[in-house]
Amino acid sequence: MRSKCDKIERLLSDYIDGTLSERQTADVALHLRSCRSCKQEIVNLKKTNHLLENFYVEPEASDAYYARFTTQLQQRIEQSAPTAFHQRFHAALTRLGWHLLTQVHRRIDRSRLIGFLSIRRHAFSYYVFALTMTMLVAAPLLLHQISPHDNGEHLIGRLYTAAKTRIFSANSPVSVQPTATLAIKQDNTVAQSMGIRRNVSSERTTETPAVDSGSDVWEFTNEPITDGYIFTTLRKNNSEAVPSVALDIDSELLAYAELPAHGAFRTGLTSRDVLTENRYALLLLKGIEAGQHGLQEYERKWNEFKGFSEKLLDVPLETLSVPEVYDSKEL
Amino acid sequence: MERTEALLIADLCEGDETALAPLVEKYKRMVYRLAMQITKNHTDADDVMQETFIKVYRSIRTFRKDAAFETWLYRIAVNEALNFVKRRERRRESALEAAAESEYEVATRHQAQIASDPHVHAEKAELRHYVTKAVNSLSLKHRTVVILHEFEGLTHAEIASILNCSEGTVRSRLHYARKKLRTLLKPYVDASHI
């Protein structure tokens, strides 16, 4: 009888919540009819729930606190807004442009508007405007500033592809294997368990990453930077999948850059996403195809990265979530 | 025109910072309540609040639109608060000090309630004090589950998703937490009639 009571007792909490299956509910109900101690137990649990519902004091803050909090949060977000000068300049310019447009819109007499926009009367202005727009579109393409993700499906992509073919025709494109380099802060006391604490998966998922450092898919090379910091290179062989890394929350990511086997010229940080209470995920940038020019560009950037990754050691982790920090750091 | 939550989230994804304020306004009390109950400390709860909403702002693009924003926010807030407590414990700050502080806060609130409502019966006031103290004395894992289930009204599945554990684990923690509470509140349980 006692063992039966033990089994039923484990179900009582769910019985109160009504989350048992029909069969389990019937079993518990049947047992309760004949067992006084379990019946008393369920009464006590119900009384406990009643006390919690009616007498637990939920914490609450004053309205003044919430007002102060909102202001502080706003300030923090403004501080974390674009940090690089060119981004601030661009944002300010955009705001100014919109302001001027609004003012002009308000002031223009609508009856004169049609005359004002007349192509016949203002042909020269239209020429200048059209020329400026053409330059704005063409210049970045020629300067290799636009990265087409559409692979030629749209006009910009087709233009870009054509420009790239012309510029890099002398060199055949090089396939890039996506690889990532991480500077990871580790507690000195747990440095030995590095292999266990670091996990890698091929896709970002809420499941625990399945592949660890023992995998033959990922290659790791560790290079100590200074006490407690390890410079880790992750390389996935024969694959162009986007690498995604899950780190224990104790492992602070300090910086990372893409390190393709054959070259590329993109670096950057990506957003963090909390997986569990102890893990967060990082989605790393994908490798891209690049010609000889790209390789040279990449090598230049890689040297820069090695320079500033060490400088970033003391930067708070939060700051590193902002990609713009790369632009604002002097190398 | 007031923007819907879905629209606010979409705007925030587009980089419109002004969309954050209405979301903060809507959920700030919920996040504070949660953070305070887990950390048991106003200063820590304030930090958790800040980190939670900053994370929402920065990670909103990773939010799956088919999921419930509230559950996503719960997950961030709970994990931030739990990590905060763990970091605090690692820093070896005196647990006794924290407990004393939380008791002090509860007692202060409790006294303030009595002062604000002179008709509150002393017996009920005492009950409030001990029930709150009993919940606060639970272990971190048990307390978190009790808070999410009993006070926030989340289902086992939702809690499992937030804590990234199985529903069975949630049920088990809830079971033991309730048993512990029943033991802690035994004199009041025996005396109460429902």
Image: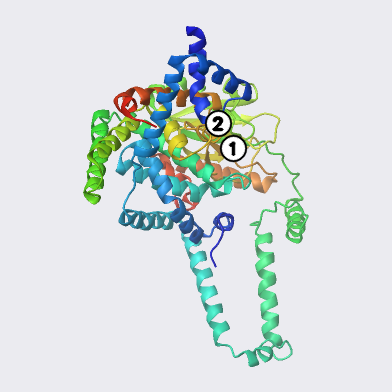
Helix, strand or loop at label 2? It is: strand
Q: Nearer the viewer, residue A4 or B36?
A: A4
Q: Residue at x 74, y 46 (%)?
A: A171
> Can you give x and y, in whole percent of width and height, for residue B7 in the image?
58, 58
Give the image quarter of residue A159.
Answer: bottom right
Give the image quarter of residue A251.
Answer: top left
Q: Which disc is residue A259 wearing?
A: 1
Q: Label 1: how many residues lie within 10 Å, few (<14), some (14-19) or many (20+)?
A: many
Q: Nearer the viewer, residue A291 or B79?
A: B79
Of the numbered discs 1 and 2, the one sitting upstream in the chain is: 2
Q: Chain of mark 2?
A: A
Q: Chain of mark 1?
A: A
Residues at badges 1 and 2 in contact (C-beta under 8 Å)?
A: yes
Tag 1: amino acid: Leu
Helix, strand or loop at label 1? It is: loop
Horizontal side of A295 relative to A104 (left or right) equals: right
Horizontal side of A32 relative to B83 (left or right) equals: right
Residue A192, visible in the rendered structure: no
